[in-house]
Amino acid sequence: MPERERAASVEIADAAALRARVGGEPLVSDWIEIDQARVGRFAEATGDHQWIHVDPERARRESPFGGPIAHGFLTLSLIPALLTQVAKIKHRMGVNYGLNRVRFPAPVPVGAHVRARFAVAETNELADGALQVTWDVTVEADGAPKPSCVAQFVTLHYF
């Protein structure tokens, strides 16, 4: 695992504190390893057994990536858990509301370590009392020249 300091977690006490993060410095998660076992469990859970993910020998021989890679949606699915590492939001309830845009500019090789950067792009008060937050998220693999995933992640927070 890359030798790095542990990511700092920010406590967000209320909606005002979330609104105050708009345009602020991104929060950066810890690194996590994407090993073949995790990729295999994701393939089982989703039914996506494409050989570039689950057949390391064939992936080394035939894929343009030189070995097996994680599913793009596996990388995407880590975003909520990585967010909870860096933002301890003191809400009554939080909901993953969706995504506005997702791209996978570069693969995540099996064995890589990834982390995410979260920046609050905007907030909106909803009629039901929720605060809708749009996060600009970048997931990067250690040492990779391009991000592995770039997304706008939308969450709802009830305080």
Image (cartoon, rainbow, N blue to C red):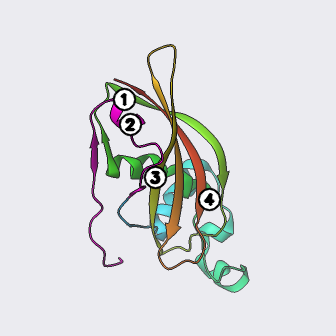
Q: Is residue 130 left or right of residue 5?
A: right
Identify residue type, mark 2: Leu
Quadrant (top left/top right/bottom left/bottom right) for the N terminus: bottom left
Numbered tag placed on residue 18 in the rendering: 2
Mark 1 is surrounded, within 10 Å at the Cα level, by few (under 14), some (14 to 19) or many (20 or more) other residues, namely: many
Mark 4 — residue? Answer: 72
> At x 63% / y 51%, what residue is drawn?
47
Of marks 2 and 3, the one in the foreground: 2
Secondary element under disc 1, as helix, strand or loop, is helix
Mark 1 — residue? Answer: 15
For marks 4 and 1, the one nearer the N-term is 1
Q: CA distance from mark 4 to mark 1?
A: 32 Å
Label 2 with label 1: CB-CB less than 8 Å? yes
For marks 3 and 1, the one nearer the N-term is 1
Q: Is residue 103 left or right of residue 76?
A: right
Q: Which residues are magenta?
A: 1-28
Q: Which is more toward the observer, 126 or 24? A: 24
Q: CA distance from mark 2 to mark 3?
A: 12 Å
Q: Position of residue 36 (x, y in %)?
A: 49, 70
Of marks 3 and 4, the one in the foreground: 3
Q: CA distance from mark 2 to mark 1?
A: 5 Å
Residue 54, by quadrant, is bottom right
For marks 2 and 3, the one nearer the N-term is 2
